[in-house]
Amino acid sequence: MRKVSKLEAKPPQLPERKKVAAYARVSEEKGRTLHSLSAQISFYSSYIQKHREWQYAGVYADEGISGTTDNRAEFRRMLENCEQGKIDIILTKSISRFARNTVDLLETVRHLKELGIEVRFEKEGINSLSEDGELMLTLLASFAQEESRSTSENVKWAIRKGFEQGKTNSFCIYGYRWDGEQFNIVPEEAEVIRLIYDNFLKGLSAEQTEMQLKEMGIKSYTGGHFSNTSIRAILRQERYTGNMLLQKTYIENHITHKSKINRGELPMYYAENTHPAIINLEIFEKVQAEIARRKELGVFANWSINTTCFTSKVKCGNCGVSYRRSGKRQRKKSSQVYYIWTCQTKDRKGVSACGAKNIPERILQKVCAQVLGLEEFDEDVFLDRIEKIVVNGKDELIFHFYDGKVITQHWESTARKDWWTPEARAAKSAYSKKHPRSSGTITCFTSKISCGKCGQNLRRNTSTRVSGEKARHWRCPPRTDCGHNGLEENLLKTISADALGINEFDEAAFTDKVERITVVSNEELIFRLKDGSDVTRQWHFKRRQPAWSEERKQRLSKKMIQVWRDKHERRENS
């Protein structure tokens, strides 16, 4: 018999539209303007939306900055969206718009290729997913990189020729305004410059001048806060004398665009009488001499800083920075200050930056006295003989003497041991009882049960059994190897009642009569009573198995029934 089956018609499936984005960038080196960038964005937005098979995924644009990936925020955002699957195709005008660095370009294109994302370069007509795409990219990117280098060298040549003629390429400086040909003095700002120089020669620090300018309501060149860093820069700026030192900094290369201080790598040019002076040259030279003097004195040049004989003499063996003094007042005795010396890098940036160990000042003085052969520490002797102390590792101090001698001395901090006196221990115990951390943690047994082996007080531990019942045990602190199994609190109450000769445990009676309980072993307890007598009781640790759940009972019941059935069948068969 003939069989006929009906095949249902399938609705036509439209091809999935590609998500297309574009990347644009203008270069200030070639005279591009923001208008050019706006035109590129408008063109690509219209171009993508005209194609029905494409889905508009946006236009990413960076304004007038280097063609390196690290400096382009929009470029990085585009790559992040590519990794999130938001883009299938990227359109860009040319290789030089995408990247100037050959290595950077190839790494980016290869990464996008692994994600299945196509990059189309309009000017060169290259598709990154085509067979010869990467070869062409390598060649053309090399040309683009060389073009960028050549342009950069031409710009540098023009700037350096200007330096030789005494022309500057920097036009933003507080106290002056550039009119297109020369610097003109701004009277109000010039008065501030003179005040800064005058304060410095009077012995005031940059921080003190900073506070004065803040109180006067004076703002910086950009209209913000006048920082002490800006004040120090003004004190070193030779342009206020009417002269200019050119090429003090230079750009390392055309790829990174990082500025470096010229330390003799390139010639510098000193142009005299190029513009009106605000500061007399003689005053400027006096300020430079004072800066050199204060630099040599270091922290001792600032009279507002409290210094000691150890200041600038204790050095970190890890990072080489000087230690600083840090004081902490005692909570109860506010007149007493506990001083330590700590690495400044560690103090500012944390242990991850430098793990150097802190040194209590008392320990430092004690070790110095030992090295100098003194019964008591003497500041004058220390200053006369010790050049510096290097803190090496956790327990080593290296003393460098002015006569060239070097002595290595080991040290150990006893701060914790010195502080934990019997009085402090008793005070801490009383405070803990009066101010428990949480309700129910302090009982009549707290601080009264001690271990006969390690001498530590037993701590109360709470655990929850399978049945939901709370189990409380008294055990030695962690990291002790006493071998005690722990005392269950209910068992401890029963034994305590027996030792006191009462039928049921009573907290008031226990507190009044028992001074201390010593756990001798897993079999013996000694009760020290307040009347001076000792009572010994034997005890036995019994490990309690968890309560059986209903599920476990049913499972075992079924298993036992099956065992008896099998046994009965074997008997009948035999």
Image (cartoon, helix red, strand yellow):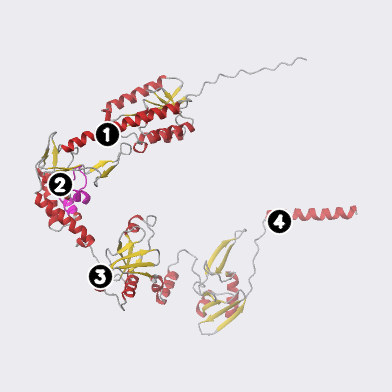
Q: Quadrant of residue 340?
A: bottom left
195 in relation to 79, above or below: below
Of the two numbered discs 2 and 4 in the rendering, the one whose residue sits closer to the viewer = 2
Residue 383's tag is 3
Residue type, label 3 = Leu
Name the residue carrying label 1: 153
User: How many C-alpha atoms fall within 10 Å of the one at disc 3: few (<14), some, or many (≥20)?
Assistant: some
Of the two numbered discs 3 and 4 in the rendering, the one whose residue sits closer to the viewer = 3
285 in relation to 496, above or below: above
Residue at image location 21% in from the left, 59% down from the top: 296
**Residue 345 magenta:** no
Magenta residues, as a range? 209-233
Whether residue 63 is visible: no
**Residue 229 magenta:** yes
Name the residue carrying label 2: 238
Marks 4/1 in contact by CB < 8 Å: the verdict is: no
Name the residue carrying label 4: 553
Q: Where is residue 292 in the image (x, y as percent from the top left)?
A: 18, 56
- Give SS at disc 1: helix
Which numbered disc, 1 or 2, marks the residue that appears first in the sequence?
1
Marks 2/4 in contact by CB < 8 Å: the verdict is: no
Which numbered disc, 2 or 4, marks the residue that appears first in the sequence?
2
Side (left or right) of 348 relative to 467: left
Residue type, label 4 = Lys
